[in-house]
Image: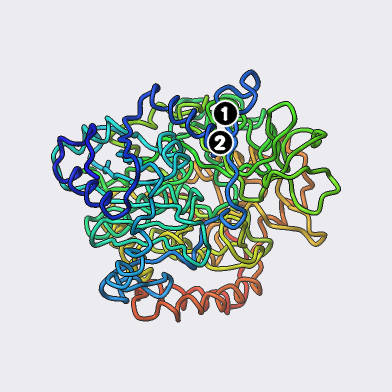
């Protein structure tokens, strides 16, 4: 089937769309332009087909509910593949498939898969218009849900085509929901060809190809070739009452407080401080002409986890989802609003759960899926930074790595230098969550929160981080954070959410040279007196426990890191191997008296 549309001026794009249409054989082809009129038409189409349920127009203007197949509710890491000619390029932490085998298997699945369906041609721009870092992708999909979500998540349509011009340089993404059979599901990346094939899933992380697939797996490969970094990081602007401004990137695995950090609202004690969102999930980092690490958010929207979101935990997110939002796999109330576990107030009577079944508090299953999501454009954010769309990006003052750990890792820790910071990120561990299929609550290594998203061998990825550091004249300081440490009774020691501003203030004080810390074998750790705890309703001993660094636990931690080092032994940078040995020696030595850490230069 031949097609015509706004992209027909680009012969490379037109030829690829026509070629794919001949393979998949859709009944219709629709070129998406990103206009308001188109959005209304697609929403009407999605409602008519049952893909979306309209919500209360007064209470949740222009909001809709989507229910996915119960077997298609999360990323499928075991079915996600890096497809390179050489298996070593993918590395031992990725699943690998031979590109020729993938083309044979998926070619047969794609053959005629869009009969009776519409193929949506979705041109999109990752990054601000006019930015030297921005890149164009085009997704061909048979899902109206995907097309609508891509409109919220990216700069879709005309901005992408204008940026592309007549070039052949664009990411080619082909997606079909197929039959949603879990046994015939593949998420395949061809980094050397700048191509993504996704089949058999409609879940966002598997189907919104601009997100994890392009912006991380494909982009991380490109970044290594070109000298920049594609990272699973939020970006925030922090302004103090005096007007001092800093930009911070932070990497947290899914459901470890990442969105809450990106949309942090400081407590009353910090009146005058402002935290503004630049991005909540992905950052592209490059070294600028002055030797600073500069970052852009390639996305234009949020695909956030819903459960636990309320006016206390994330008031900014509650404003964001109040209009123009697609909710996925939450519960539906009789008045046309939505509900999820952790939302303000008790569950209303008459709920219908995420599967479409009647639900009561006595039901065995949760009303909303633990990985239920919201998709909203970033322009919904009342605390959006004016730098969110800056083509040049922002210079980073600090990078924070954090996971969900019930023990061992203190509330905050600062690296000694860039290499040590890379080590902290490389050995990051967290308890698994519902964002990926498999068991939850299991501690696993998740280097830089990139384990599921790095598009090549992770040992070489660490080397690339070290190489980027060697080019920095003004490197950001690197920190470790853990909001989830528990006491002996199993309760959280730190209140988290907006109170994390107290830790963030200390980190920025370290950047400015105004905050003290304790030098430990593992890094610089704040003492309770180094944090502003005024007005915090928490027992002093709880703060002490949250900051505690136990030598026995850290010896066990270093030992457990051995699995990662052995797995990556062929490509693990010698500098990190030597540093691990040095840390082991430090913790084997008799304990020394506490001493104040030196002030940063």
- Residue located farthest toward the right when viewing the structure as drawn: 362
The reply to whether residue 413 is in sight is yes
Left or right, 433 with respect to 237, comes to right
Residue 287, position as x, y percentages in the image: 27, 48
Question: In terms of depth relative to the viewer, which is nearer, 162 or 67?
Answer: 67
> Residue placed at 23% from the left, 32% from the top?
6
Discs 2/1, front: 2
Reply above or below: 124 against 474.
above
Quadrant assignment, res 178: bottom left
Quadrant assignment, res 450: bottom left
Question: In terms of depth relative to the viewer, which is nearer, 410 or 459?
Answer: 459
- Residue located farthest toward the top when viewing the structure as drawn: 58
Residue 365, position as x, y percentages in the image: 76, 52
In the rendering, which numbered label is found on residue 52?
Answer: 2
Question: Total of numbered circles in the picture?
Answer: 2
- Nearer-N-terminus badge (2/1): 2
Residue 482, position as x, y percentages in the image: 61, 54
Question: In terms of depth relative to the viewer, which is nearer, 152 or 21?
Answer: 21
Category of crowding for the residue at label 1, using alpha-carbon neighbours closer than 10 angstroms: few (below 14), some (14–19), many (at least 20)? many
Quadrant assignment, res 469: bottom left
Residue beneath disc 1: 63
> Residue placed at 52% from the left, 39% from the top?
262
Q: Which color scheme did the rendering employ for the protein?
A: rainbow
> Residue placed at 35% from the left, 80% from the top?
570
Category of crowding for the residue at label 2, using alpha-carbon neighbours closer than 10 angstroms: few (below 14), some (14–19), many (at least 20)? many
Mark 2 element type: loop
């Amino acid at each position: 089937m031949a097609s015509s549309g706004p992209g027909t001026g680009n012969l490379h794009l037109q030829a690829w769309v026509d070629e794919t249409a001949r393979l998949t054989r859709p009944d219709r082809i629709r070129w998406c332009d990103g206009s308001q009129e188109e959005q209304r038409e697609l929403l009407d189409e999605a409602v008519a087909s049952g893909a979306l349920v309209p919500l209360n127009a007064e209470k949740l203007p222009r909001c809709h509910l989507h229910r996915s197949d119960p077997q298609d509710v999360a990323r499928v890491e075991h079915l996600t593949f890096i497809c390179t000619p050489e298996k070593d390029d993918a590395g031992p932490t990725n699943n690998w498939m031979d590109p020729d085998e993938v083309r044979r298997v998926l070619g047969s699945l794609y053959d005629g898969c869009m009969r009776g369906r519409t193929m949506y041609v979705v041109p999109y721009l990752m990054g601000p218009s006019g930015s030297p870092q921005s890149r164009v992708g085009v997704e061909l999909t048979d899902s109206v849900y995907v097309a609508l979500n891509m409109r919220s998540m990216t700069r879709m349509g005309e901005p992408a085509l204008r940026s592309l011009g007549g070039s052949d340089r664009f990411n080619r993404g082909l997606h079909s929901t197929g039959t949603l059979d879990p046994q015939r599901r593949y998420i395949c990346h061809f980094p050397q060809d700048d191509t993504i094939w996704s089949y058999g899933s409609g879940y966002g992380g598997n189907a919104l190809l601009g997100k994890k697939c392009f912006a991380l797996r494909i982009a991380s490969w490109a970044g290594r070739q070109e000298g920049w970094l594609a990272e699973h990081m939020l970006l925030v602007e922090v302004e103090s009452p005096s007007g001092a401004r800093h930009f911070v990137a932070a990497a947290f695995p899914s459901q470890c407080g990442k969105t809450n950090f990106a949309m942090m609202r400081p407590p009353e004690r910090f009146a005058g401080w402002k935290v503004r969102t630049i991005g909540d999930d992905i950052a592209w980092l490059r070294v600028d002409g002055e030797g600073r690490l500069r970052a852009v958010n390639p996305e234009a929207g949020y695909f956030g986890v819903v459960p636990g979101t309320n006016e206390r935990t994330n008031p900014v997110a509650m404003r964001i989802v109040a209009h123009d939002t697609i909710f996925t796999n939450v519960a539906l109330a009789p008045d046309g609003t939505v509900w999820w576990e952790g939302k303000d107030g008790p569950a209303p009577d008459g709920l219908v759960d995420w599967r479409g079944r009647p639900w009561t508090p006595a039901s065995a299953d949760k009303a909303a899926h633990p990985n239920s999501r919201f998709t909203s454009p970033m322009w919904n954010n009342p605390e959006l930074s004016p730098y969110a769309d800056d083509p040049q990006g922002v210079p980073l003052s600090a990078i924070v790595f954090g996971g969900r750990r019930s023990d061992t890792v203190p509330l905050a820790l600062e690296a000694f230098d860039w290499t040590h910071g890379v080590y902290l990120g490389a050995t990051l561990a967290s308890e698994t969550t519902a964002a990926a299929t498999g068991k939850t609550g299991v501690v696993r290594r998740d280097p830089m929160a990139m384990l599921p998203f790095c598009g090549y061998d992770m040992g070489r990825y660490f080397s690339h981080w070290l190489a980027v550091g060697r080019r920095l004249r003004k490197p950001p300081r690197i920190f470790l954070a853990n909001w989830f440490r528990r006491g002996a009774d199993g309760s959280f020691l730190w209140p988290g959410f907006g109170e994390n501003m107290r830790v963030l203030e200390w980190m920025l004080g370290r950047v400015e040279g105004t905050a003290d810390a304790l030098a430990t074998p593992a890094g610089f750790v704040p003492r309770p007196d180094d944090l502003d705890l005024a007005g915090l309703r928490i027992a002093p001993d709880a703060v002490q426990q949250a900051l505690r660094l136990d030598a026995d636990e850290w010896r066990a931690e270093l030992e457990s890191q051995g699995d990662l080092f052995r797995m990556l032994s062929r490509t693990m940078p010698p500098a990190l191997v030597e540093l691990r040995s040095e840390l082991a020696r430090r913790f084997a030595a008799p304990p020394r008296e506490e001493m104040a850490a030196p002030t940063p230069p």
